[in-house]
Amino acid sequence: MELFQTIYHHSLLRPENYKLIGEAHTRVEFSQGDLLLEKGKISKSFYLIEKGLLRSFLYDYNGNEITTEFYCPGEILIESLSLFHRIPSAENFQALSGGIAWKIEYDAFQQLLHNIEGFREWGRAWATNQLFILKQRSIHALTINATDRYLNLIKERTQIVTQSPLKYIASYLGITDTSLSRIRKEIFKD
C-alpha cells in the first residue's frame, strides 16, 4: 500500500481510493534479463517498480543498442506511446536485476481514471511532470557536457551508477564506453 501512496500521491486521493488502486494491480516478480515488453509488441499495461533496476533500449540506424531510460524503485515503467496510442513499441524493456513490480492493465487503469477524481487529477499531474522531465533531459543532452551529465546521474539516481553495466550508462548519456571510462577516471582519480 505504501508504494501506491508514494507513486500515486495526490491530495484528492483518500485511503479507500488507495485500496481500490492497489486491488487493480498484480504483483510480478522478474529476473535479470527478463523482457517486460519487447519491441514490436503493443503494451497492454505498465508497472510500478518496488524492487530492482530496469531499462528501456532500442537500436539506432546503425544497429547500436541505445539505453533510453532506467527505472528504479518508486518509479513507473511505462511505454506511453504504445500503451495509449495502441501501436507497437519501438523499445525493449529489460530487467537489469531481479525484482518486484506491480502491474496494472490498461483497462483497469482507464477504469480508475474514470471512477476516481483524485486518480484522474494525479494522472494529469504525472503526465505534465513527464513532459517536463523529457524536455529537461533533451535540453541537458544538448547544453551540458558528458562529465556533468554523469555527475548529475550519480547525484540524482545513484542506483543506476552502482548497479548498471557501464555500457548501458554510456549509451544513455550519449557517449562511448571509452569516453565514460575516461570521465570516471578523471572524477575518481583522487
Image (cartoon, rainbow, N blue to C red):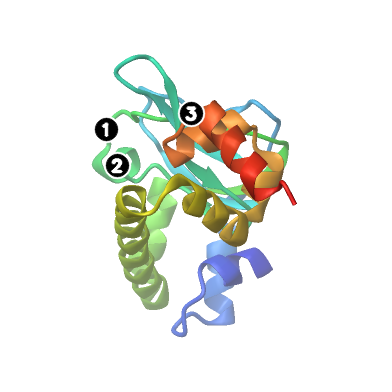
- Cα separation, mark 2 vs mark 1, equals 7 Å
Residue located farthest toward the top when viewing the structure as drawn: 63
Kind of element beneath mark 1? loop
**What amino acid does circle 1 point to?**
Ile
**Quarter of the picture holding the N terminus:** bottom right
**What amino acid does circle 3 point to?**
Thr
- Cα separation, mark 2 vs mark 3, equals 28 Å
Report the side of 133 relative to 5 (left or right). Answer: left
- Residue 155 — which label? none
Residue of label 2: 81
- Residue 176 — which label? 3
Q: Position of residue 54 (x, y in %)?
A: 59, 40
- Asked if the residue under mark 1 is in contact with the one under mark 2, i.e. CB atoms within 8 Å, the reply is yes
Q: Residue at x 27, y 37 (%)?
A: 86
Graded by Cα atoms within 10 Å as few (under 14), some (14 to 19) or many (20 or more), the crowding at tag 1 reads some
Residue 126 figure quarter = bottom left
User: Mark 2 or mark 3, which has the lower sequence index?
Assistant: 2
Q: Position of residue 51 (x, y in %)?
A: 70, 50
- Residue 87 — which label? 1
Give 173 or 91, whichever is nearer the viewer: 173
